[in-house]
Image (cartoon, rainbow, N blue to C red):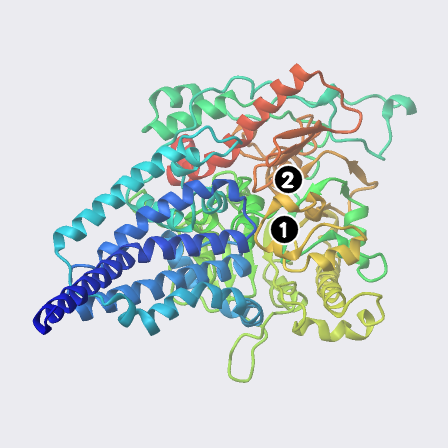
Amino acid sequence: MGYNGRRMSGSRSRSQRSESVVMAQTMARVLLFPVLLIYLELVLHIYMKTAMVYAPVYLVFSLAGGFFLSALALPWRRLANSLTAKILAVLISLIYVVEIIAKTILQSYYGPSSLDTAANNRLTDYADVILPTVLRSIPIILILLLPAVLLCVMGGPLLGFERLDIRFAGVVVAVCAVFHVAGLGVLHLPWKGDLTPAGLYRMDTNVDDQVEQLGLLTMLRLDAKHMIFPVKNTMGNDFSGIGTLTPPGGTSAGGSSSGDSSQTGEPVPVVDTSPNVMDVDLAAIAENGRNDDVKWLASYFNSVSPTRKNEYTGMFEGYNVIELVLEGFSGYAIDKELTPTLYKLTHEGFVFNNYYTALHYTSTSNGECQTLLGLYPKNGNPITMKDTGVLRFKENGQSVGFNAYFTLPQQLKRAGYNVLGYHANSEMYGRALSHSNLGYDWHQFQVGGLESSPRGTLSEFEGLELSESGKLLWPQRDTHMISASVDDYINSDTPFHVYYLTISGHMPYSNNRVVAPYRDTVRALPYSETTQNYVATAMEVDRALELLLQKLEAAGKLDKTLIVATGDHIPYFNVDTLEELSGQTFGSSKDMESLNEANIDFDVYKNSLILWSASMEKPVFVDKPCCQVDILPTVSNLLGLEYDSRMLAGSDILSDSEGLVVFTSRCWMTDRGFYNRFTGEFAPAEGVTMTAEEQDSYVAAMKKLVGYKLDSTPLIVENNFYNAVFGG
């Protein structure tokens, strides 16, 4: 072959190699984002220890989303394609990093609908946790960012990013659509369990389960979609069985040390056991409500069995009421010598042996939701407690928030009480609006010019501990909060209801300023330093309660005051601390931080509830399983208030209703036993016998009821249901 022949052959060879390179680069660019999303999802799921059985669902959706993103970086000029691909890769990788950090610190994944909450929350409250968490997470952060970094450094030479025909980009979008349809098909495979991918795809709740089964990217996409197109109620109208659930043997509160009058020869008083209901026609609302959600709620509540009045109804009628939600509190920290006031209040009033403060979405805010509203929080966005203050409803020409008709501030305000609330911190979770909307004359630090609802007022909390530069010292001492506020109401001529949200027990416990006065005492304890410091925060709560009781006694108000106190949530960052204090094993803090309830012992949530008055002569012992949502109906009954027990998620603990504790994972506990959603198994309680048929029927009815209790809350809030029933 001559020179020209060799030259032509070489040209063809180079041309073929060039075509091969172009083809390889094109395929690499098309597959870039599908591979990246699959990588990110797998890393997240492995790191968060989720069930890998759902990988087919989120991997197919990752392919669909990836092809769409790849199409965005194909039809432009070389530089534009390169920048688009690199920016998208970095942003998407950072989203996965941020979501893992947020889940670890705040126990929540944050979708688009919660960005305002993330932006408005005081992350400085978590400053001492954020940096250590980020440092501890550096390995996983580097793993997540590695592909994006390699793309930025080596992407140009490897991928070229040359311009491609826009029609080719259209073909890639078509491939995206094919995989999306395939993903919808995978959703409807015969998955097992109470929550399935198909069901979660239609929900705007159960964010953790959505991430586990559908993938983080799909959760974020659905969250954005539901901001524009709200989900419809798909709970159905089968209320059969939920109105006939009664405790085994029809027992009530669980025994009392106050004695039995039938044995002492004293006459047995006649007890009114009529149902705690109000004169409302739920059937008529179910027929004529203003929309389908209101009709459904009325039908559901009309099917619920009300709790009955009992020997404790009106026991504290006309009493002052002071309610406290204690930050990060666990009853495992109570000690007769170290915390004598807490010990006294938990052992000499009503003694609840099976009380739980289960973690739910956004911990403190929705701990308040359960306690103040008597409702389980929505397991997703918007955050329920914050949402109650959004001024989106009209009453008498004014914009108002949700009408929380049954809350203590609204009930007691109608009864002529002076109603006040205090939190020694700045604005967070929208409390300025939500708590004033509940009816409180609400006091917090730095109001910031926000307007309150017509139902309450909003004021600057004066007298808090400030630095020389005028900044709020963190955290505030609970004793100082009581001292700075008690004179506002202690000498009131009218009965008062006061609510305190404490702050001293806020994590982290390695560097908490309230420890100082108790340091010498706790350093003698046989615990780690973190646990010693946690005990010190409980001692601060104890001294605050002691001060409150002293002030009440000095004012002659102690015997006519009911003290109610509960933790908002356990110290979920410090499971090892609870294990030290209790001598039990609960599981890892990492599982607790990520709310992975499949791997924890639910006794970690066991806590102490204070219902105490100095007028009680003997303690009353209660063995029924109960939790925060039960506080509102129980206190309403003790105060002799008129309320409708059907329209709250909780129940009067002192009634003959069955006890129920619902956990965020939809596991639940009743008098009859414990249901594990992860295994689908029901374990009868000690002494409870049921046939297989009875057990299956009972579990099916309870699962339905639990679902209604959890999923009805957003319908109640978003439709201002109580306003539809009772008017403004």
| Side of 4 relative to 50 (left or right) | left
- The single residue placed furthest to the left in the displayed view is 4
Q: Position of residue 551 (x, y in %)?
A: 71, 61
Residue, disc 2 = 635
Disc 2 marks a residue whose amino acid type is Val
Labels 2 and 1: the sequence-earlier one: 1
Which quarter of the picture shows residue 250?
top right
Q: Position of residue 578 (x, y in %)?
A: 73, 56
- How crowded pointer 2 is (Cα within 10 Å; few <14, some 14-19, many 20+) is rated as many
Disc 1 marks a residue whose amino acid type is Glu
Q: Vertical placement of 666 versus 116: above or below?
A: above
- The single residue placed furthest to the front in the displayed view is 1
Q: Secondary structure at mark 1?
A: strand
Q: Residue at x 81, y 47 (%)?
A: 347
Q: Residue at x 49, y 59 (%)?
A: 100
Q: Quadrant of the C terminus?
A: top left
Q: Quadrant of the N terminus?
A: bottom left
Residue, disc 1 = 323
Q: Vertical placement of 379 versus 281: above or below?
A: below
